[in-house]
Image (cartoon, rainbow, N blue to C red):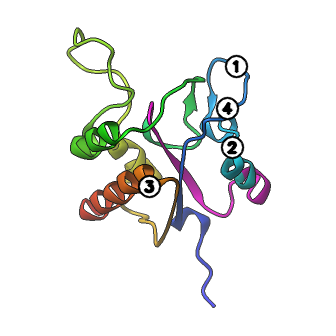
Amino acid sequence: MTSILPSRRLLILSCSTTKRDGPQYMPARDRYDGPLWRTLRHADPDGQKAQVAFLSAEYGFREARSTIENYEARMTPELAAAMKAGGLGTRWPRPKTQRRVMPPGEHPGMHIASMTEHGRKPFVEVCLVGGALYLDVMQHFVELFQADAL
């Protein structure tokens, strides 16, 4: 049996309505406190079994060690469609106004590129966990990551 290194596994979880209080910014892995995230922290407390990313209605696709604020946002069909249409280059969270030339936030492409060492260490196993709207966006992003060899 061949062993797959954790860095070659990717687990993408949907965000969680339940969040932990704490500092203004804390890693998403620690902020989210729904059943999936509790199970992750229990089953893989040191992050050795897989690299973990999340999909959030507020933050889009990010690596789970990314720091986030506590927020309230739900995925809607319109938001899922906007995320898919934006592809790997759209920054999240979306700006509240159109005043800035360069919108704030981070985009999925930068996170997946970092997680794969810019395609030098692509994932060989990917697991997606979430509700239907989240899974739809996750699957779309995974297809884009594969097309870009990330």
* Front: mark 1 or 4: 4
Image quarter of the N terminus: bottom right
Q: Is 16 in the magenta?
A: no
Residue type, mark 3 in image? Ala
Q: Amino acid at mark 4?
A: Lys
Left/right placement of residue 47 relative to residue 138 reads right
Q: Does residue 54 belong to the magenta stretch?
A: yes
Among the two numbered marks 2 and 4 on one chain, the one whose residue lies closer to the N terminus: 4
> Between marks 2 and 1, how big is the CA–CA gap?
18 Å
Element at badge 3? helix
Judge left or right: residue 125 versus residue 6.
Answer: left
Residue 23 bears which disc, if any? Answer: 1
Q: Give the CA distance from mark 4 to mark 3.
A: 21 Å
- What amino acid is at disc 1? Pro
Mark 2 and mark 4 residues within 8 Å of each other at the beta carbon: no
Of 73 and 105, the residue lying toward us: 73
Check contact, mark 3 vs mark 2: CB within 8 A.
no
Residue type, label 2: Gly
The residues colored magenta run 41-59
Furthest toward the bottom, the residue is 1
Front tag of 3 and 2: 3
Q: Which numbered dot is residue 19?
A: 4
User: Residue, x 67% and y 35% (percent of image)?
Assistant: 18
- Secondary structure of the residue carrying numbered label 2: loop
Residue to which mark 2 is pinned: 34
Depth check, mark 2 against mark 1: the one in front is: 2
Q: How many other residues sit within 10 Å of disc 3, few (<14), some (14-19) or many (≥20)?
A: few
Residue beneath disc 3: 132
Disc 2 residue crowd, few under 14, some 14–19, many 20+, Cα 10 Å: some
Q: Secondary structure at mark 1?
A: loop
The quadrant where residue 149 appears? bottom left
| Numbered disc total | 4
